[in-house]
Image (cartoon, rainbow, N blue to C red):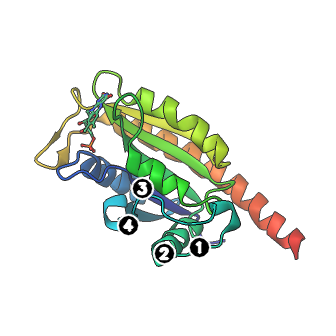
Amino acid sequence: MPKPVLSIIVASTRPGRAGLAIAQWFHELATAHDSFDVEFVDLAVVDLPLYNEPRQPITRNYEYDHTRRWSEVVARADAFVFVMPEYNHSYNAALKNALDYLYHEWRDKPVALVSYGGGALGARAIEAIKPVLTALRLIYAGEVSISLSRSPVVDNVFSNDEQLDSRANTMLDELHLITSMWRTLRLEQRRNAH
Ligand SMILES: Cc1cc2nc3c(=O)[nH]c(=O)nc-3n(C[C@H](O)[C@H](O)[C@H](O)COP(=O)(O)O)c2cc1C
């Protein structure tokens, strides 16, 4: 069986964002982990407008090309890692908007979270996103929280350390295990439907 596809989603779209360097660090680790085919998805490049589909995503009946393109990106993934900042004790609006656009494409797929922020290490962003993951039937598969004061991004380079690398690798082990189980179930369900 081919390796599962892991989509690493850079949630921040802000010029000068720390998120890009953190996502690049995680992308290198995930590639070296060698258990996934890794895709790098930058919401700044995806560039979705504020939700403007006339119908609900549950209909999967899309009016616009930007939605159809986004649908293809998310549909081909077997698992996700959201690299997400804490904004005002929550996660950022661009990520919520990108999540809202789709439904079936997220469903029954594991997601792990890499959050970052000040003193609270993005923990409030993680708590805020959990009910949304549940609504979309995404499967929560772990997290790594980063303090930007302890591990800053300087000149677009993330100052990771061994402890963070080790936590991220443990999260990837767990994500791979959960993804393999859910992918088998999804394939079985698809076979039974035909
Ligand atoms: C709109 C906004 C709100 C923020 N609110 C919080 C917050 O509630 N808690 C926190 O720890 N950091 C907060 N920060 C600081 C961010 O965590 C920090 O700027 C981080 O670099 C943002 O991620 P980004 O650079 O990838 O966009 C906020 C930053 C912005 C831009």
Looking at the rendered structure, the kind of residue marked 4 is Val
Q: Residue at x 29, y 47 (%)?
A: 19
Q: Could you classify mark 2 by the number of other residues whose Cα lies within 10 Å: few (under 14), some (14-19), or many (20 or more)? A: few
Can you tell me whether the CB of the residue at mark 3 lies under 8 Å from the nearest atom of ligand 1?
no
Farthest residue to the top: give it.
119
Disc on res. 167: none
Q: Position of residue 58 (x, y in %)?
A: 68, 61
Q: In the drawing, does residue 65 fall left or right of residue 106?
A: left
Give the distance between the C-alpha atoms of the residues marked 2 and 4, in whole angstroms. 9 Å
Q: Residue at x 62, y 65 (%)?
A: 55
Q: Residue at x 45, y 73 (%)?
A: 66
Give the distance between the C-alpha atoms of the residues marked 4 and 1, in whole angstroms. 16 Å
Farthest residue to the left: give it.
155
Residue 65, above or below 118: below
Give the distance between the C-alpha atoms of the residues marked 2 and 3, in whole angstroms. 15 Å
Q: Could you classify mark 3 by the number of other residues whose Cα lies within 10 Å: few (under 14), some (14-19), or many (20 or more)? A: many
**Are the residues tagged 2 and 4 within 8 Å (C-beta)?**
yes
